[in-house]
Amino acid sequence: MGEARGTAVPLLAGTGLVADTLARLLEPYGLRRIPMGAVPDDAAPHGLRPVHPVPAGAAPRNWGRMDGAAGPLVLASDGWPIGGDDVTAGVARIPAAGSLTVHGEPGELVIGPWQRPGVPGCPSCVRLRRSRAQEHFRALCARHAVRLADAPPTGLPALAVAAAADLVAAEVTAMREGRYVDLRASGAVMRLNLSTLAVRTHRFLPDPFCPYCGTLPDDGPDRARLTLRSRPKPAPDRYRIRDMRQEFDDLHSLFVDPYAGLVRRVERDDEAGFTVARAPLGLRGGAPGAAPVTESGWGRADNYRDSDLTALLEAVERWGGVAPGGCRPTVRAPYQAIRSDAIDPRTLGTHAPEAYATPGFPFVPFTEDTVCTWVWAHSFHRNRPVLVPLSVAYWGTALTHPDEPRFVDEISNGCALGGCLEEAILFGLLEVAERDAFLLTWLARLPVPRLDLASTADPRTRVLVHRIEETTGAEVAVFDTTVEQGVPCLWAMATHRRPGAGRPAVVCAGGAHPDPEQALRQALGELGPIAASVARSAPRHADRIEAMVRDDALVRRMVDHSLLYSHPAVGSRMDFLLASDRTTTVAEMSRRCGLVPQDDLRNDLHALIGRFLSTGMDVLVVDQTTAEHRAAGLSCVKVIVPGTLPMTFGHANRRIHGIERLRTVPVRLGHRTSVLPETAVNPHPHPFP
């Protein structure tokens, strides 16, 4: 191929000043110009010609058979072809050795990307990425596409076009010679500033949903079937296979770009001395012409680099959880037609019957004859693939599948990212355990033991406690909320004895980990920045907080739960915890839970899953991994455990109907002598942040 590429004649197609100038400047490189309409035989080397006659002035959309190698093709346009009916939209159908686009935008010339046969990544991919990375891109396309397509950049300097010609010449030469590693516009675009001649390169990831080069396999049971692999750990107390801190620069380069990146940027902030990072990304779906819905990953650590990394990875995880991005769902049926292969959605916890009857409630009650879309998951109890509703497996279906019936409010509960599949499953299952234990403790008002913070053997934990108390003025308390599976779970709480402006009454967080020491550090690491954030934001929402104190139904958003409990009038709702006279230690938790760290992560995961299976529960895993995750060697999953209490936000969205464990586990744990009656269930919104 290298020899054929080296002798093939490069081609240029296009009209306008940019095309004319490039044709003149690149003539010494052997580039031949071809018209945008019908292609003359002598201009198309080796018999390259359109399959069908092309109307004058129209772009060829489908090219015929090549008898031999064809040279690189440059497609040039003065304007900004951001609509769908332009020559660049058909690049993926042109069987040239490679196709490079050059077009003008206000204040700049944009070169790239290359489109190569069989290689994903084309101009349409760039447009899709930009439509999510740039908040106003969709509105710009909707309002000004026609005008921008016809309008060349104002004041196009000859020097700028000459600079663009040099860049194009270097690209075409490298492509002809097969030096693909030297292609600056392969999987990227170059933006040449018309005033300064500065060149910025923006990499992008191919979009699997691209109508021209995207490919998505069909979902099916074979894709969902899991076989856990051996994953030797760096050390027994390390539960991450890869040290992502060492990979941060590569991950940032791969995912973060304000022009066409999956993640727009990573922002830094601080909360009373705690480092906080935010990584926003635009989501698929939403109204045409409207700004994309933005979801953010958050990072909280004791230094900015770790906060940046956590925020970035959480944003990338959110991308997997919003909607199917690794395969296309293929099953659409009522439950009654597939019950032998499907999970009954009623086992996942539903809303109260009266909630469904509320006018404007966005969810519909489940019935066995309701037709909906299903995706495949792996069941560890059945040891085979099973079907779960799309709207349960992915939390963003309201955006991407607005006509899909949604039976319950679903969030990212149980979604996790890992350096391998086993790692992602382990941390997804830990999140399910953490939230279930927190909600069970809250709803049943369990008087769980307080953890003696002096019992920690980790000096970092003692420093963290001191730092939280010094910076927030609150007193830190931690409670052991471990339930029947014996997975170490903790509830961390910061309380002010004299709450007031800037001194929230109560702030809470949670943590879960096979090692109680690490669970404690995780819970405190969440608590500190959240406590500082609530202290700063609560005074601005004083009127709303007062209203929520009077009416629980006004707790509608995630942030409302923390804001509500900043008010001293509701502090007494925590008395069932704070009044407990029982205590435990980190060492006692470790002995009681008995999850001994292993040398192989697969063994840790088997032990964790076994805890749930031994208590009569199932563990389901939906593989949410997308092409974007695979580009970094990452895995993304959602773990679902039917019968656990799912975390929701907004008091009206609580999902406890049908969860029998809420009644029976308090007895099993020794907190009650009889099942919890419905009248004893805590009626107030939970305080989880």
Image: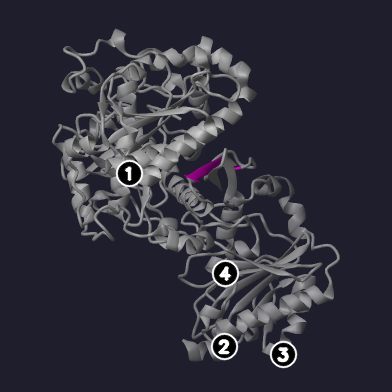
Q: Give the range drawn in magenta.
A: 292-300
How many angstroms separate mark 2 from mark 3 (CA)? 15 Å
The residue at the point 72 percent across, 79 percent down is 165
Instruction: Inspect the image, locate mark 4, and give the three-letter code of the amino acid beneath it.
Output: His
Pointers 3 and 1 in contact (C-beta within 8 Å): no
Circles 2 and 4, Cβ within 8 Å, touching? The answer is no
Marking on residue 52: 4
Which numbered disc, 3 or 4, marks the residue closer to the eye?
3
Indicate left or right for 417 with 197 as reference: left
Name the outermost residue toward the right: 155
Decide: is 634 above or below 7.
Answer: above
Residue at the (56%, 39%) spot, across then down = 286
The residue that disc 1 covers is 518
Question: Is residue 362 covered in magenta?
Answer: no
Q: Is mark 4 on a helix, strand or loop?
A: loop
Residue 414 is situated, as x and y percent measured from the top left of the image, at 34, 39
Q: Which of marks 3 and 4 is nearer the N terminus?
A: 3
- Of badges 1 and 4, the one in the foreground is 1
Kindly report the distance in space between the C-alpha atoms of the residues bearing marks 3 and 4: 32 Å
Q: What residue type is labelled 3?
A: Pro
The answer to whether residue 239 of the structure is visible from this angle is yes
Which kind of residue does numbered mark 1 sit on? Gln
The amino acid on which the numbered mark 2 sits, given as a three-letter code, is Ala
Q: How far apart are marks 3 and 1 (CA)?
A: 66 Å
Other residues around mark 2 within 10 Å, as few (<14) / some (14–19) / many (≥20)? many
Residue 516 drawn at (x, y percent) = 28, 40
Query: What residue is disc 2 on?
Result: 8
Relative depth, front residue between 209 and 617: 617
Q: For mark 3, what is the residue?
A: 28
Of label 2 and label 4, which has the lower sequence position? 2
